[in-house]
Amino acid sequence: NAGVTQTPKFQVLKTGQSMTLQCAQDMNHEYMSWYRQDPGMGLRLIHYSVGAGITDQGEVPNGYNVSRSTTEDFPLRLLSAAPSQTSVYFCASSYTTGGLAGANVLTFGAGSRLTVL
Amino acid sequence: AQSVSQHNHHVILSEAASLELGCNYSYGGTVNLFWYVQYPGQHLQLLLKYFSGDPLVKGIKGFEAEFIKSKFSFNLRKPSVQWSDTAEYFCAVAPHTGGFKTIFGAGTRLFVKA
């Protein structure tokens, strides 16, 4: 049971380049999300998904794009990288109990450290 | 909108000292509350959670937290810290029903001197 797997672990980009951070989970979790972690700012929610085909914006969505074509995968795309997007990115997932269920415990990936020059 | 405020960004304690980390939240409804911990070089993991019931919840490694609804607070406590508690601690808030969006505070870096 791998849990939440993120790739790559490290990436260096030049300003203006695009790239995709991959996230996959094997726990059949419906809820998946992306956070960025910056010193002194904690984890800020970028985008999240409550199931295949359903995505929504978090606190800091600008410059990022997501899609959820399968339950397992939730890639994060940087459309045109900027130095302000230098950060550590975490993918997290949780199961839901359906209906009017609320949030549950998140399982996190190991993180992807991105540097934009 | 949800928001979380953690009062201390950096805390330095000696071993055996008591710990209390403050957390206040803002949300217009019933909440689920969490404390997560990130040990050096490790994944973020759950320390403890409150969904309903007894407002005093116990987690792993001797940590506990008290939910005070009237103060919108969920402070984390440990009576006697150890060097191995050196880590970054995050408070988080999420809807109790009808949603899953989990919002985190800025985190508190705890350093415990041996």
Image (spheres, coloured by chain):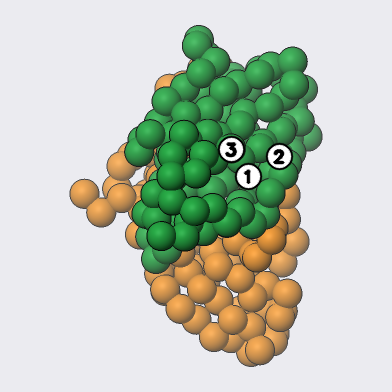
| Colour for chain A in the figure | orange
Q: Mark number for residue B104?
A: 1
On the image, numbered disc 3 is attached to which residue? B20
Element assignment for label 3: strand
User: Which circle's residue, 3 or 1, is located before the other in the chain?
Assistant: 3
Quarter holding the C terminus of chain B?
bottom left
**Res B95 quadrant in image:** top right
Q: Nearer the viewer, residue A37 or B98?
A: A37
Q: Is residue A117 above or below residue B71?
A: below
Q: Is residue A8 above or below residue B19?
A: below
Query: Label 3 to label 2, Cα distance in Å?
Result: 16 Å
The amino acid sitting under disc 1 is: Phe
Quarter holding the N terminus of chain B?
top right
The amino acid sitting under disc 3 is: Glu
Which label lies toward us, 3 or 2?
A: 3
Residues at circles 2 and 1 in contact by the CB criterion of under 8 Å: yes
Residue at left 71%, top 39%? B4
Q: Nearer the viewer, residue B50 or A9?
A: B50
